[in-house]
Image (tube, rainbow, N blue to C red):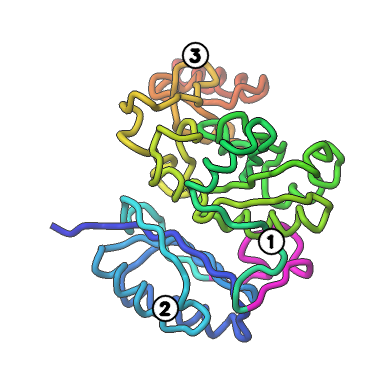
Amino acid sequence: MTIGKVLLYYCFTPIKDPTSVMLWQRTLCDSLGLKGRILISEHGINGTVGGDMDACKRYVRQTREYPGFKRMQFKWSEGGADDFPRLSVKVRDEIVAFGAPGELKVDENGVVGGGTHLKPEEVNQLVEERGDEVVFFDGRNAMEAEIGKFKNAVVPDVRTTHDFIAELESGKYDWMKDKPVVSYCTGGIRCEVLSSLMKNRGFNEIYQIDGGIVRYGEKYGNDGLWEGSMYVFDKRMHQEFGQGIEDPGFIQLGHCVHCGKGTNTFHNCINEDTCRQQVLICDDCVENAETQHCGRSDCAEIAANLVDHNSKS
């Protein structure tokens, strides 16, 4: 029986010729039967790929042969190539699209001027020592926090990473500038950039979780400061820690927009023409066309009309 795995990884390091690295990575993944998404820029590499375990191991070994990637850490999770529709390897101005490629500085040690890295146990230690003074700051899209976040975290009102700079400069978070702020995201990469952007804008004591939510969840499961599920950008849609939703310590944060039933699964609104919103809809409601919408009145009307049309045909 073939065992599949998903690899999540990134590395900030200067790359003189991103196009050559892109072509090499595409050829390597094709030869190993891996699928997923890889972005490469002059600042480094950011990827999520899935495939057979042996193929993933070979990918890790061969990718680390590139001098700048020798120190790159790979996070392993359940899954495989089937969790991705295709292989996409592209060159971009940024490997995380904050819209500030000229502001980010990297060297052979990673991001220059970013936040202090904390291991999961150091995060807990900081909270034990500083108590309520510590602020957890979500570095993801607000939607992701609907199913899971750190306890009492501040969740910025952003739909994409491009929204963060305007949000930081809005003045809404100036009260945090002299507090210990722990930024966090799925695997750590968004916070590498976000923490440097925050420091550049006067946030004085910025930390980031080494390895992100993934590493923290692996360490503490549902017995730490994390609550709920973690959103992931593949067919799985979400990931739980410990014993999953059956774990006694699991806290259900996500709820269906229609009936309120607990759920961790996002679905696209039925109004595909004008609404691209993903919303939480439980299994029961998603089976009914009348409740396959985001909750907006215009989308609800479209769903109702569709039901009416189908009933008459």
**Residue at image point 36% right, 52% down:** 83
Q: Secondary structure at mark 1?
A: loop
**Residue at image point 61% right, 22% down:** 295
The earlier-in-sequence mark between 3 and 1 is 1
Q: Position of residue 103 (x, y in %)?
A: 78, 66
Magenta stretch in the rendered image: 90-107
Tell me the residue that label 1 is attached to: 114
* Label 3 to label 1: alpha-carbon separation: 43 Å
Q: Is residue 245 above or below residue 33?
A: above
Label number found at residue 259:
3
**Residue at image point 51% right, 65% down:** 10
Q: Is residue 268 left or right of residue 59?
A: right
User: Per the image, is 103 magenta?
Assistant: yes
The earlier-in-sequence mark between 2 and 3 is 2
Q: Amino acid at mark 2?
A: Arg
Tell me the residue that label 2 is attached to: 64
Q: Amino acid at mark 1?
A: Gly
The earlier-in-sequence mark between 2 and 1 is 2
* Label 2 to label 3: alpha-carbon separation: 48 Å
Q: Position of residue 176 (x, y in %)?
A: 78, 39
Q: How many marks?
A: 3
* Label 2 to label 1: alpha-carbon separation: 24 Å
Q: Secondary structure at mark 3?
A: loop
Q: Residue furthest front?
A: 129
Q: Choose between 256 and 196: the one closer to the eye.
A: 196
Of circles 2 and 3, the one toward us is 2
Q: Amino acid at mark 3?
A: Cys
Quarter placement of the C terminus: top left
Q: Secondary structure at mark 2?
A: loop
Q: Choose between 31 and 299: the one closer to the eye.
A: 31
Q: Is residue 267 above or below residue 27?
A: above
